[in-house]
Amino acid sequence: MCLALEEMSDLVALKAHNKGLEFISMIHHEVPSALCGDPGRLRQILINLAGNAVKFTEEGEVTIRATLENEDITHATIRFSVTDTGIGIPKDRMDRLFKSFSQVDSSITRRFGGTGLGLTISKQLVGMMGGRIEVESKEGKGSTFWFSVAFEKQPESRVKKFVVSEDIRGKHILIVDDNATNRLVLREQLKLWGCRFDETSNGVEALAKLQQAVTDKDPFDMAILDMQMPEMDGETLGKKIKQNPDLKNTILVLMTSMGERGDAKHFEEIGFSAYLTKPVKQSHLYDCLVTVAGIQKDKKEELPAKIVTRHDVVEDQKRGVRILLAEDNIINQKVALNILKKLGHFADVVANGKEAVQSVERSPYDLVLMDCQMPELDGYAATRKIREMELKARESTPMASESSGLSPRWKRIPIVALTAHAMKGDREKCMEAGMDDYLAKPVKPQELSDMLRKWLIN
């Protein structure tokens, strides 16, 4: 679910920024991270709704939220909302919205284009997912389209545990952004990571808060600055902070909606530790903050460190990953390896289940792509043997705490099934064998990319 929202944000953000709109996406910290659903349908609904929001908004912002509506042991109902500050919809024309090839009126068709089919498709897709879709709007004030869908929760044993790095937990961080929704998003994320935080909407107040924190002997470790702010922008504020002897050691992270080539080097010279373009994925922001906090902790000299960018974060995530591909068909091996290479990953390859078990026994892998039908030992049997090895390792390490876990060598390895069959019951058979997820062959690049991000990135 998080992946669908983030990928949709990448597609829509550029259009929003080209119109000078603020584009924001957020997932509330109460929303479970591991849910089973149809990411393709979810992605399409969000693209349709967000695309319309951008099209019908001339100034202001477009915001996408995912919040928890209710949950029980097995399911969680999530509400997705897309809010804009656009033209709004008259009350007497709301009933036309979800009808095929219908706009609110013909003048809107002439001015903005489109047929209105996207909303009809969205309603059908929401219905196919067992949910419902509604709209709230005020003419001239904007609209909110929202839909609720129930998702099955993944068993806790298959959920990748997330442990916040000590480099960021408890850090005192100041949020500086003139947009209230952006501040809300950052608050939710910092709260999730156990940070202490404060916020302000302008540079003058930010300088006062930073100085007061020094006086109170509780200085801010870090400040996240928005670039596009009135009166005093993020660049000017950053310069003032670095020129102040009391504040110069504050780690500065700049977030901008309008990045250009060469900007990162420029801000590095000012003294910024990180430079990120919006919308910033939650996993990228987390890794960025952990990285710059770790650099500051280990710093032993006055020379400025290289600035951290979104590109650096993505590449670091990929470089640290070890993948095992268990597949007996040479052509399928080449196809999978080629897709992985294009995604920035490499993998070790084995041709049967027995070799897969031996490889896992020898080396710590972050993920296994396991073909189900292989000679000597099929994927189901190989998975069972790997789970047995992990279980024995746990039993021999009884004092391991949940926060530290087992040695990384024997943490539960995500195993994704690769199968040429898409028959009813196949997924259940994979899960019963101890696999964590399922991909049908032939493997498609987007589906494999989604799977890697789901299991390899926090």
Image: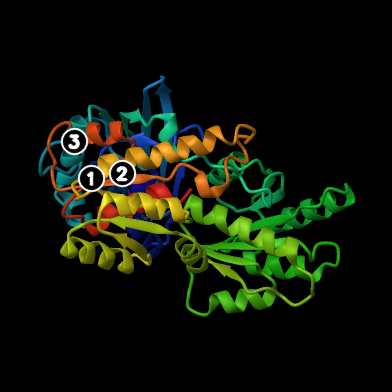
| Res. 388 visible in picture | yes
- Mark number, residue 382: 2
* Viewer-nearest residue: 13 or 304: 304
Residue 86 located left or right of residue 118? right
Q: Amino acid at mark 2?
A: Ala
Q: What kind of element bears circle 1?
A: loop
Image point 47% across, 35% down: which residue? Answer: 391
Residue 177, image x, y percentages: 60, 53
Which amino acid lies under the numbered mark 1 shown in the image of this protein? Asp
Q: CA distance from mark 1 to mark 2?
A: 6 Å
Residue hosting label 3? 426
Q: What quarter of the picture does the N terminus occupy?
A: top left
Mark 3 crowd level (few <14, some 14–19, many ≥20, 10 Å Cα): some
Q: Please identify the quarter of the rendering in which residue 349 is found.
A: bottom left
How far from the left and from the top, in percent, is residue 72? 41, 19
Q: Please provide percent x and percent y for residue 166.
A: 68, 48
Q: Identify the mark at residue 248; answer none if there is no mark.
A: none
Residue at image position (70%, 56%) is 222
